[in-house]
Every structure is written in structure tokens, then in C-alpha cells.
Amino acid sequence: MDPLTDVLTLAGARGTVAATVHAGQHWGLDIADVPGAAFHAVNAGTAWLTLEGHPARRLAPGDILLLPEGTRHRLASDPGQPCRPFDHAAAREAMANGGILRTGEEPYGTRILCASYRLDPAVATPLLTLLPTLIQPHTDPGDPLTDLVRLLAHEIQQPRPGTATALNRLLDLMLIHILRAWLAEADPHRLQPSWLAALRDPTIAAALTALHDDPAHPWTAQTLASHIAVSRATLARRFTAMVGDTPNAYLTRWRMELAAHRLRSTADPIAPIARSVGYTSEYAFNRAFARVHHLTPGRYRTRHNQLHTDPVL
């Protein structure tokens, strides 16, 4: 699989609808403490987004927003409109009772889908934290993002059996397309080195894909360079500049990420886990794992099980 698919899969990235806001006149919502990344799609009407450090922006039908770290923000009928807290408990109740959270004065001409994305906090490879505070990708007729917003609106307006599942799956697709759009539109001069930003470069993306496709392979700088048909010097220079790490350091961290996931999710013995990520020596694997996670594999698993075992009543 490609690196983005790998990280999304390992992190268990999932979108969940928080509420469908039906807003009228003189309304405002103060949205704070979002459990994950915040997402909004405007299906009808208009709204204003206010976010600290950014100018207020007017939103229209088809506009979508992602706030990767759930930063506090406001949605309102006007930039200066007083806002009431967006209570997530009330939002969940709204979804359970038909999926609508009404605010403001009738008529309710604005409809906004509000959702959130959560990732497994145990996954150390960063994803959403690599993104800017706010992403609003450009959408054009025929763009996949436009089609996804249309499908979201259709499911919201005409709920049927399976609508909740359909909405969540569409949100999963939406996140992938938003990330793709950001990679395509981001200013390369303003990107910090990271595995995600490096996917913009076809050569380094090919190197990352090779490492992800076969993490247990005994890769060296030379074999990886030969695999993607560049010189070792070119690979070393460009990989480090774009990813912020050497190929060997990146591979070691990714191997330990895979091993940690398997330790958390299975009861497999440590020896086969070590072999699955390229270590024939369990001792060498234990040392490498401890350098990355600051615990031996056995203690890591025990700690995770202790934290995630329900107390006996």
C-alpha cells in the first residue's frame, strides 16, 4: 500500500457526523473542544467562519472546511454575531433524534454538516498535526470533492436505512480527497519536511512506497536508490531534505510503528512480530523498539493492556 493509505489504516481514521445544523437568522455557534479534527460542509445558505489568526470568511454552498486539530472556531450568520456554545452532547442527541440541530430564527435556510475525525492516539506517525490550522480546498464542478458534498447533502436530506453508515463512509472518502487537494495546492516553499509533504515529490514518494510495501526487506541506501533508479547521493540528499530524516531512520520508525500496532492489537509472540518487520534477532528488535517507544515490547504490551482493560465490578 502507499504511505498515506498505510498511515490512515494504522491510525484507524474515521469520520463521525456530529450534527446537521439548520440555521436561520441571527445565529452563532462557538465550537470548541472538538474530539479530533473538525469538518464542515455547507449544503445550503451561507455562514461566516471566524478563527483566531485568520480573517473572517464567508462560506457558501459547496464549501468544505477541515480544522485538523479541532481548533476553536465560530460559525455564524454574521461575523459579529454573538455565539452560543456548540454542545457536543446536544449534537449527539440531535443526531439520535433525526440528525438536526436547529439554531437561530426561522426560516432555516442554512444547512451545514458538522463532523469530526478521530485517529488512534497510540499511533506515533503524525498525520493531522502536519497540516495547517485550516484547510479549505478549492472545489469546481466535476471535482470529486464537489460530488462527495452532493452525496453527503443527499443522504442528509433523504435519510434511509443505512444513512448513518453511508455518511461515515463518505466522510472517510472526504478526508482522503481533502488531503490530496492540500498536497496539490500547498505552497512547497511553506511546507515543513515530513513524510506527508514528501509525497508531492514523485521520486521520494516512490522511495516511501517501496519501504511501506516491504518493510521487512533488508533495505540499504544503495538498494533503495537502485529500486527507484536514482543515485545513492541523490536519494540521500532529497529524502533527508523532504522527509526530514534519512531513509534508514524513517524505515526504523515505521517498522516500530507496525510492531507497536501488532503488540496492541494481537497476542502474537514477540519473535514473529520481530521477523515481520525485518529482525531475525529478537534482542536487536527489543533494543530498536525501546529506542523508539522507550519501553521494551513486552512492557509496551503490558502497559497498553493495563490502560485498556475495564475494571472488574
Image: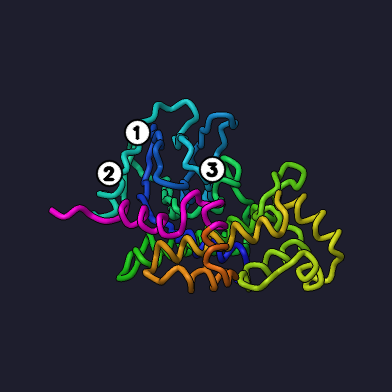
Number of numbered discs visible in the structure rendering: 3
- Relative to the observer, which residue lies in front, 1 or 54? 1
| Residue 173 visible in rendering | no
User: What's the magenta region?
Assistant: 287-313
- Report the side of 299 relative to 2 (left or right): left
Q: Amino acid at mark 2?
A: Ala
User: Vertically, is 57 above or below 7?
Assistant: above
Q: Tag on residue 89? A: 2
Residue at x 84%, y 63% (from the top left corner): 232
Residue 255 lies in quadrant: bottom right
| Residue 296 visible in rendering | yes
Residue designated by label 1: 85
- Report the side of 155 relative to 208 (left or right): left
Residue 301 in the magenta stretch? The answer is: yes
Q: CB atoms at circles 2 and 1 under 8 Å apart?
A: no
Callout 3 crowding tier (Cα within 10 Å): few <14, some 14–19, many ≥20:
some
Q: In what quadrant of the picture does the N terminus appear? A: bottom right
Task: Give SS at disc 2.
Answer: helix
Residue 309 in the magenta stretch? The answer is: yes
Residue at x 30%, y 71% (from the top left corner): 161
Residue 4 lies in quadrant: bottom right
Residue at x 43%, y 27% (from the top left corner): 81
Q: Amino acid at mark 1?
A: Pro
The CA span between labels 2 and 1 is 11 Å
Task: Give SS at disc 1.
Answer: strand
Residue at x 35%, y 31% (from the top left corner): 84
Residue designated by label 3: 59
- Report the side of 212 relative to 300 (left or right): right
Q: Amino acid at mark 3?
A: Leu
